Image (cartoon, rainbow, N blue to C red):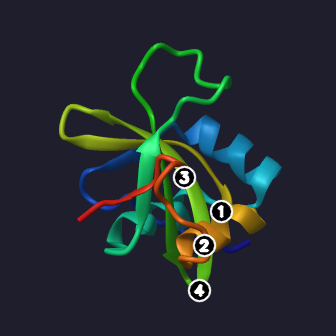
Amino acid sequence: MYYKIVMPIDGIEWDSKKARINFEKHKVSFETAQYIFSDLERLERLDQSEENTSGEERLQTLGMVMEKVLFVIYTERGKNKHIISARLADKNERRSYNGYYQIDGKGWSKTI
């Protein structure tokens, strides 16, 4: 049997159990999702969703990874970005990323 091990990029981290659960649910690995932070055109906003019950400040980001637009939720822990969730962006999120929807009023902003 063959296993491919992908190490996190320096400054990116995640919980391995949560990563397995996320992959089973969304079919997007955190190993792949970490590359969202390399997209200089990515959009971000504060996570104000009802699912954010942890009390920590979380960010939602939309970005291109391997020719797919991903939606990733993460938090900053010290100097690291801690990935919480990753999935393919839905139709409206893809449209926002591609500039078809005005990002003003939706909370999205460019990261740079």
Q: Position of residue 29 (x, y in %)?
A: 62, 59
Q: Quadrant of residue 35?
A: bottom left
Q: CA distance from mark 4 to mark 2?
A: 7 Å
Question: The disc labelled 1 sits on which kind of residue?
Answer: Glu
Nearest the viewer among 94 and 33 is 94
Q: What kind of element bears circle 2?
A: strand
Tag 1 and tag 2, C-beta contact below 8 Å:
yes
Q: Position of residue 90 (x, y in %)?
A: 75, 62
Query: In the rendered image, which residue does mark 4 sit on?
Result: 67
Do tag 3 and tag 4 residues touch (Cβ < 8 Å)? no
Which of the two marks, 1 or 2, is nearer to us in this view? Answer: 1
Q: Residue at x 44, y 45 (%)?
A: 45
Q: Choose the circle earlier in sequence order: 1 or 2.
A: 2
Q: Which residue is mark 1?
A: 93
For marks 1 and 3, give the one nearer the viewer.
Answer: 1
User: Mark 1 and mark 2: span between their CA atoms?
Assistant: 8 Å
Is tag 3's residue or tag 4's residue first in the polypeptide sequence? Answer: 4
Give the residue at mark 3: 72
Disc 1 to disc 4, how far (Cα)? Answer: 15 Å
**Mark-to-mark CA distance, 3 and 4:** 15 Å
Count residues near mark 3 (Cα–Cα under 10 Å), then give few for <14, some for 14-19, many for 20+. Answer: many
Q: Is residue 107 rendered to the left or right of residue 87?
A: left
The quadrant of the rendering that contains the C terminus is bottom left
Badge 4 vs badge 2, beta-carbon distance below 8 Å:
no
Residue to which mark 2 is pinned: 69
Please, which residue is most extreme toward the right here? 25
For disc 2, the neighbor class at 10 Å (few under 14, some 14 to 19, many from 20) is: many
